[in-house]
Amino acid sequence: MISIRQVSKSYGSFQVLSDCSTEIKKGEVIVVCGPSGSGKSTLIKCVNGLEPFQSGEIIVDGISVGDPRTKLSTLRARVGMVFQHFELFPHMTIVDNLTLAQVKVLGRSRDEAAEKGLKLLERVGLKAHANKHPGALSGGQQQRVAIARALSMDPIAMLFDEPTSALDPEMINEVLDVMVELANEGMTMMCVTHEMGFARKVAHRVIFMDQGRIVEDAPKDDFFGQPRSERAQQFLSKILHH
Amino acid sequence: MAYNWNWAIFLSETPSGESTYLGWLLTGLQWTVTLSLSAWIIALTVGSLFGVLRTVPNRWLSMLAAAYVETFRNVPLLVQLFLWYFVLPELLPRGMGDAFKQLNPLMQQYIAATLCLGLFTGARVSEQVRSGIGALPRGQRNAALALGLTLPQAYRHVMLPMAFRLVIPPLTSEFLNIFKNSAVATTIGLIELSRQAQQLVDYTAQPYEAFIAVTLMYVMINVTVMFFMRRLEQKVRVPGYLGGNPS
């Protein structure tokens, strides 16, 4: 469903991504991890064209992201994305956050969109907050709304860019629970995260990045069992044992 | 100091006999308000447009907007007014220039002063709108785009509503300034409020009363503007954000 082929990107002389390739099949859950500055967030933003890249190509559901003729807004409407800092729209109520793009992009009627939005809010356990503004919700609640907002567009795949890194420890699980449920339902997911518990539980494959390169791309059990690269071993020992 | 205070002067008839001196001041007030409000409409429209253009990912558009801002905020207001009033009609195509000069002089002054003040203030508004957009978290734009909104839709529904809320306080200052700056229109002969004060002094030799009255009228305008802008600020306040209370 998503193929990333020899993607490279640089800011001036600084190479952010070099020669990254991987393939994500329908229904697969991929966790991308690595030290900060390794290019994982940049890579995931390239998938829906939020970050341009200089060479290589990314094909999402048969559409080339880098092709200048591709209408990126149409592509993005079909790929959900969740951000580190939630990015709900603060001046709109929660339910309006969920209906805006359904109405403006998909052309659904206001009622239809609101119905869908409320159903999704119920699913993430926040229906009672529908008429509040984002500022009145906790971080964990905001992130669950953000996931519901992405799902309201009926996406074919979901991208998560460090969805729990800005959360208080107590709120991480409520967000991960929603993500696990989504994974179990067969959603195609690409998640940049350091939540190794989540990776162990639902990921099919783990991609490890360092200095703009994909150093390791292995089935979950292989990655946690015996990471091949020394860099990945170091990384895992640092985040798992203390 | 031997000064003869005479507050009743406002009620005496003017030499022409068709009005009182207070009537003169009120006519001046009317011109000041009309000129400033029409210039403000131009300033807000043009300023918002160019403020947005400066932030879009297109080099030509943002350069165009930068050129506008730098031209209009770096040339003294008075010089700009003279250019609009005395020079521009000569530069226009013959027909348009002549048509302008055949207008009633008051109309000529009003049009030149409105355009001048509107575009001068617009350059300043543009910078504020730009800074409001710049102050938003960058992720907001990405989140809007990631949902499939086009860039214009992202501006319209996501970025501008917040950016304008952020810049209400500095925009209030600009709104107040435009009333005070409108006094430059006296230099091309428009008889607005400050000009009426001078005229009153010439006719009555009561400078203190005249300028006190005019000052109070400017204060009144400003208090009204501040009142409405404050109301607006409260009305659009976002709960749980910018000092608003969580709902």
Image (spheres, helix red, strand yellow):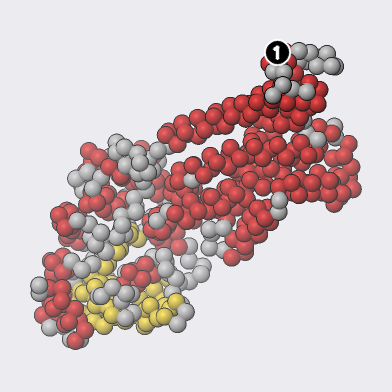
Instruction: Determine the residue positioned at 58% across, 39% down.
Output: B175
Question: Image quadrant of residue A229?
Answer: bottom left
Q: Position of residue A7 (x, y in %)?
A: 39, 79
Depicted B57 relative to depicted A91: above or below: below
Instruction: Determine the residue positioned at 60% across, 49% down.
Output: B124
Subunit bearing disc 1: B
Structural crowding at the residue carrying mark 1, measured as other residues with C-alpha within 10 Å and reported as few (<14), some (14–19) or many (≥20): few
Question: Image quadrant of residue B181?
Answer: top right
Please indicate whether residue B102 sits to the left or right of residue B191 in the image: right
Q: Position of residue B184 (x, y in %)?
A: 72, 40
Depicted A202 relative to depicted B201: above or below: below
Q: What's the amino acid at mark 1?
A: Ala
Is residue B191 at all visible to an observer of this figure?
Answer: yes
Instruction: Determine the residue positioned at 84% across, 16% down.
Output: B15
Q: Nearer the viewer, residue A116 or A129?
A: A129
Depicted B105 relative to depicted B16: above or below: below
User: What is the total number of numbered labels drawn onto the structure image?
Assistant: 1
Q: Nearer the viewer, residue B212 or A220?
A: B212
Please indicate whether residue B13 sits to the left or right of residue A120 in the image: right
Q: Which residue is the site of mark 1?
A: B8
Question: Image quadrant of residue A173?
Answer: bottom left
Depicted A187 relative to depicted B122: above or below: below
Q: Position of residue B187 (x, y in %)?
A: 78, 39
Is residue B28 at all visible to an observer of this figure?
Answer: no
Instruction: Determine the residue positioned at 24% across, 77% down.
Output: A208
- Mark 1 lies on a secondary structure that is helix
Q: Position of residue A1 (x, y in %)?
A: 32, 69
Q: Quadrant of the C terminus of chain B?
A: top left
Q: Quadrant of the N terminus of chain B?
A: top right
